[in-house]
Structure formats: structure tokens, C-alpha cells
Image: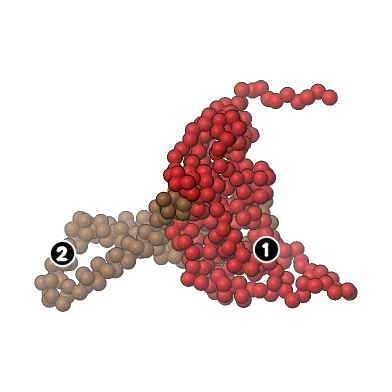
């Protein structure tokens, strides 16, 4: 009953990349890649701490990353890392008021100036860069 | 003078209108009522709702006033996206059924009517007026002059009609019950950018809060749904630029 009165979209609405264009997709991907990288860092600390169990322990854990699934996971990490970095630079420029557009009189049909071509190109470039880095990473890992 | 006859090109069609009904105060949970209404190419969603009220069920709860996107009363979710019902034609929405629901991130009063208390409280909190010790015009003085360039810095943000669509589309509003919201933040920028205003430091202090401006992560959805071209996302980022010292 309380939820009905409240009528908030909640996590489900916050995490939905649909309805509001590429900027909302970038927002969603930024959140997802950030959480993914956080999970990777935790796993990475666990992985490197295996050195405390000696060379055998280290080799045993390292062997897990040398499988097809391990390579695929690392490729996803590369993609998340590149997207998060490139889109993060765009967001720093926008949120510093540098790439956020110039205010002026609003004219119908009111296309938001903050969602300009520069921003859209930067978002698509971040996605393409991430995809290229993933393909390159897969080529290197499976080419070993 | 001959009367102008309505067009008879067969453009009139029937549209199924699905309205989400609820009455939290009476303990009635959500359900959907379906109505078939006639639609011309110029029929708006608000026209359709009013036809449903007139011809089918007068108890449908809806708030409206000006019917020309000026008062900001008829904001609602139309096919899952926040829009003004009076500013959205049925013909823009394709051939399927049209679903209208109360605006998300606002408490439901009844059916399509939502409460604006939080929005008005947040708006009031940022002191939405010019703070100046020179407000009184003494004989022999002029009103504070502004160049066209100075007016351009804030005039688009002055077009806000407080309809709440931006707050409804905002992903932070969907999860943070105390977030000040894009409407109020954009209005804070409107006054910060005004050369007549002397309240900048105080306003920046108000919005520099754990549920203030830094909870905006620039999803841009607020600007996407704004029916007046206010572009709240731009105002918020420019405001951040001020606070970070880049502007």
C-alpha cells in the first residue's frame, strides 16, 4: 500500500536504459561497468593474495584465467574499463560545465542543447572503443 | 459568411484508452479501466481523457487547467513516458492502445492526480527569487539594466512551468526520497546566472548537500521530457561548473 502511495520508479526504473535515448543508455552502462569493475577489483585482490600460499597457490589460481571462460571474462573487463574511462572523461567535461552546451532562448521543438552532437559522438565513440579493445584483447588472449 | 466544415477525409478513428485507477486513501489498489474514444488528428491525450469522463465514467480523476502547456497541471505517464496530456496528440503515439498512468516519483492522490508537495518544498528551498538589496527603485535611479547577452544566460531556465515531468524522468528521483530534484536545481541555476541576484553563495550552500546537486549523474532524461525547452540537465551541469570553479 505504501508503495502505491509513493509511486517511485525504484531501482527497476533507475536501471532501465530504455525510453530516454542514448544518454540514458550511457548512464546505465556507466553504472553497470562501474559495479563490474568494482567486483573485478575485489576478485583481483583475492587473486593476487594467493601468492601468500606460495608458487603452487599462485599457479593454481592463474590457471583459472587461462581458460576460455577466463579469457571471455577478462575481455568483458577490458571493455568495461575502456568504456568507463572514455565515458568518464566525457562526463567530467560535461559536469564541469565545459561540454554542457550554451544557454539561450528556447525555440520549439525544444531540442535540448545539453544533448548535443559532441556528446552523442563521445558516447558512441566510447562504445566503439570498448568493442575494439575487447576484440583486440580476445585476439591477444586466444592467440597465445 | 459560410461556416467552415470539419474535414471529412476519414481521418477520425477510434482509440483504446487505458487509464490506471487507484485511490490510496480509500485503500483501493491500482487497476486499469479501458475506454474507446474517437480521435481526430489533432485530438490530445487530455481531450481523450475528458471524452472518457464525459461519455463513459465521470469518476476518472485528472488534474488540468489551461490546455495549452502553460499551467503544468496535466503531467502524466503516457505510454510509459512523462508528458503533458494537453501537449501530446494521440496521432503522435502510433496505432496501438494508449496507456495513461500517474507521474512516477510523485505520490498518487487518486487515479492520474499526484501530489506536488515535495516539488514545491524543494523549489522553495532554493530561494526562487532575486536576492538583492537594491530592489527598491528610488527617484532618479533606473531599474537594474541587463544586456541581451546577460538575459540569454538564464532566460531559458525561466520558462519552467513546474509540471514535474523532469523529476518524474530522473533516475535519482526514482531511488532517493530526499533528492532535491532537477526542477529545483535548474531553478537554482536560473537565479545564480542572473546578474541582478546576490544570493549565489547561499544557494550554492543549500544545494551542496548529500542529497543535493552531486546526486545528479547526468542521465539527461529530465531535458528529454521537458515540454518547454528548459533543459534542466544543462542548468545543473553549469551549476556544477560554478561550484567546481570552472565557470
Which circle marks residue B154 in the picture?
1
- Residue A61: quadrant of the picture: bottom left
Residue A126 placement (x, y as % from top left): 43, 58
Chain ID, mark 2: A
Crowding around mark 1 (Cα neighbors within 10 Å: few <14, some 14 to 19, many 20+) is many
Circles 1 and 2 in contact, beta carbons < 8 Å: no
Q: Would residue B144 be seen by someone viewing this image from the given angle?
A: yes
Residue at 83% in and 72% down: B137
- Who's brown, chain-wise? A
Q: Nearer the viewer, mark 1 or mark 2?
A: 1
Q: Is residue A1 above or below residue A33?
A: above
Residue B163 percent across, percent down from the top left? 60, 52
Q: Quadrant of the C terminus of chain B?
A: bottom right
Q: Which residue is mark 2?
A: A63
Q: Position of residue A30 (x, y in %)?
A: 41, 60
**Residue lying farthest left?**
A56
Location of the N terminus of chain B by quadrant is top right
Chain of the residue where label 1 is placed in the rendered structure: B
Label 2 Cα crowd, 10 Å radius (few <14 / some 14-19 / many 20+): few
Amino acid at each position: 500500500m505504501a508503495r502505491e502511495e509513493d509511486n517511485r520508479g525504484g531501482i527497476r526504473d533507475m536501471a532501465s536504459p530504455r525510453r530516454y535515448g542514448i544518454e540514458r543508455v550511457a548512464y546505465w552502462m556507466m553504472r553497470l561497468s562501474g559495479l563490474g569493475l568494482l567486483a573485478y577489483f575485489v576478485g583481483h585482490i583475492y587473486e593476487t593474495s594467493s601468492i601468500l600460499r606460495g608458487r603452487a597457490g599462485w599457479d593454481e589460481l592463474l590457471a583459472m584465467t587461462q581458460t576460455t571462460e577466463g579469457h571471455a571474462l577478462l575481455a568483458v573487463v577490458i571493455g568495461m574499463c575502456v568504456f568507463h574511462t572514455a565515458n568518464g572523461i566525457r562526463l567530467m567535461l560535461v559536469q564541469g560545465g565545459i561540454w554542457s552546451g550554451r544557454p539561450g532562448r528556447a525555440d520549439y521543438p525544444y531540442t535540448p542543447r545539453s544533448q548535443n552532437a559532441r556528446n552523442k559522438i563521445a558516447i558512441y565513440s566510447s562504445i566503439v572503443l570498448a568493442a575494439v579493445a575487447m576484440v583486440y584483447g580476445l585476439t591477444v588472449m586466444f592467440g597465445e | 459568411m459560410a461556416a467552415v466544415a470539419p474535414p471529412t477525409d476519414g481521418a477520425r478513428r477510434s482509440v483504446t484508452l487505458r487509464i490506471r485507477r487507484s485511490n490510496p486513501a480509500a485503500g483501493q489498489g491500482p487497476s486499469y479501466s479501458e475506454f474507446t474514444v474517437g480521435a481526430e488528428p489533432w485530438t490530445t491525450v487530455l481531450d481523450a481523457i475528458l471524452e472518457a469522463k464525459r461519455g463513459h465514467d465521470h469518476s476518472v480523476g485528472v488534474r488540468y487547467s489551461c490546455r495549452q502547456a502553460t499551467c503544468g497541471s496535466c503531467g502524466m505517464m503516457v505510454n510509459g513516458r512523462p508528458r503533458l496530456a494537453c501537449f501530446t496528440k494521440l496521432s503522435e503515439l502510433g496505432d496501438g492502445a494508449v496507456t495513461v498512468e500517474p507521474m512516477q516519483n510523485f505520490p498518487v492522490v487518486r487515479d492520474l492526480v499526484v501530489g506536488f508537495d515535495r516539488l514545491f518544498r524543494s523549489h522553495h528551498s532554493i530561494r526562487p527569487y532575486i536576492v538583492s538589496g537594491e530592489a527598491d527603485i528610488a527617484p532618479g535611479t533606473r531599474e537594474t539594466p541587463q544586456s541581451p547577452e546577460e538575459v540569454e544566460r538564464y532566460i531559458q531556465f525561466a520558462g519552467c512551468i513546474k509540471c514535474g515531468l523532469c523529476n518524474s524522468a530522473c533516475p535519482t528521483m526514482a531511488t532517493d526520497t530526499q533528492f532535491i530534484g532537477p526542477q529545483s536545481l535548474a531553478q537554482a541555476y536560473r537565479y545564480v546566472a542572473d546578474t541582478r541576484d546576490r544570493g549565489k553563495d547561499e544557494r550554492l550552500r543549500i544545494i551542496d548537500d548529500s542529497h543535493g546537486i552531486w546526486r545528479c549523474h547526468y542521465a539527461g532524461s529530465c531535458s528529454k521530457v521537458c515540454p518547454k525547452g528548459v533543459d534542466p540537465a544543462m542548468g545543473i551541469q553549469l551549476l556544477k561548473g560554478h561550484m567546481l570553479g570552472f565557470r
